[in-house]
Structure formats: C-alpha cells, structure tokens
Amino acid sequence: MTVNFQYVNIDVSETLSALTTEKLEKLANKFEFLISAQVYFKHDEKDHETGKICNIELSLPGPRIFAKSNEKNYEMAMNETINDLTRQLKKRKEVYKTH
C-alpha cells in the first residue's frame, strides 16, 4: 500500500510519518483490499485547546473511506483517525463477505 503525506501549516515530521505508516501497514495486512492512503496533518490556529488535525483517506474498491480527528497532539489525532477507519473497514469487510 502506498502512503502519501501532506503537512499543512506545520513542519514535516519523519517520526510522525514513520509511526503513521507503521499503523497503516498493520491495517493493510488485516484488510488486504486497501490500495493507498492520503494522510494530511494540519494545524488550526483558531482552536487553541486542540487544533492538531489528522485526515486520512483510504482508497479501496468501491467508495473511498475518510476519517478526521482534532486532538491536543498529532499522535492522539492519528490514533483516533485510524480507530475510526478500522471501524469503517470492518463494516466494509462484512459487506464483501455477503457477496
């Protein structure tokens, strides 16, 4: 699975990219139909409490799956987003099993 990163209004973080890639690879091993992932890390300056945003869009057969989180730090946002994606992928896998 290919993973593309975009950092909006923040500096590029190699450790954050590596951690995210590792988690997405685990998802790809579990759900073999994944094709690619677009990962966006953004900083919202208006939101002082949280403002660390992680968007992930997964390409797979059928409609794409998207999840977004806004947390205190990027690691928490990434974990929350991947948890949301995992829930959506489990539902999608159930649909595939019925056919």
Image (cartoon, rainbow, N blue to C red):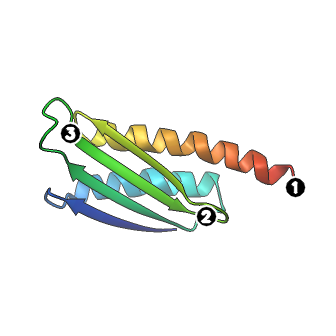
Count neighbours of disc 2 (C-alpha within 10 A) and say few if under 14, some if 14 to 19, many if 20 or more.
some
> Residue 48 shows which numbered tag?
none
Taking the image as shown, residue 79 lies to the left or right of residue 85, namely left
Helix or strand or loop: what does disc 1 sit on?
loop
Between marks 2 and 3 in the image, the one whose residue lies nearer the viewer: 3
Residue located at (57% from left, 68% from top) = 35
Label 3 is placed on what type of residue? Answer: Gly
Label 1 is placed on what type of residue? Answer: His
- Where on the picture, by quarter, is residue 34? bottom right
Helix or strand or loop: what does disc 2 sit on?
loop
Residue located at (27% from left, 54% from top) = 41
Is residue 49 placed above or below 38 in the rendered structure?
above
In the displayed image of the protein, which residue is found farthest to the top? 49
Is residue 20 placed above or below 87 in the rendered structure?
below
Residue located at (36% from left, 44% from top) = 78
- Name the residue tied to disc 1: 99
| Separation (CA) of disc 2 from disc 3 | 29 Å
Label 2 is placed on what type of residue? Answer: Leu
Helix or strand or loop: what does disc 3 sit on?
loop
Q: Determine whether label 1 and label 2 are within 8 Å by CB.
A: no
Is residue 9 placed above or below 72 in the rendered structure?
below
Residue 91: where, in percent of width, then height?
68, 43
- Name the residue tied to disc 2: 60
- Name the residue tied to disc 3: 51
Quick one: 7 or 62, which is closer to the camera? 62
| Separation (CA) of disc 1 from disc 3 | 41 Å
The mark nearer the N terminus, 1 or 3, is 3
| Separation (CA) of disc 1 from disc 2 | 17 Å
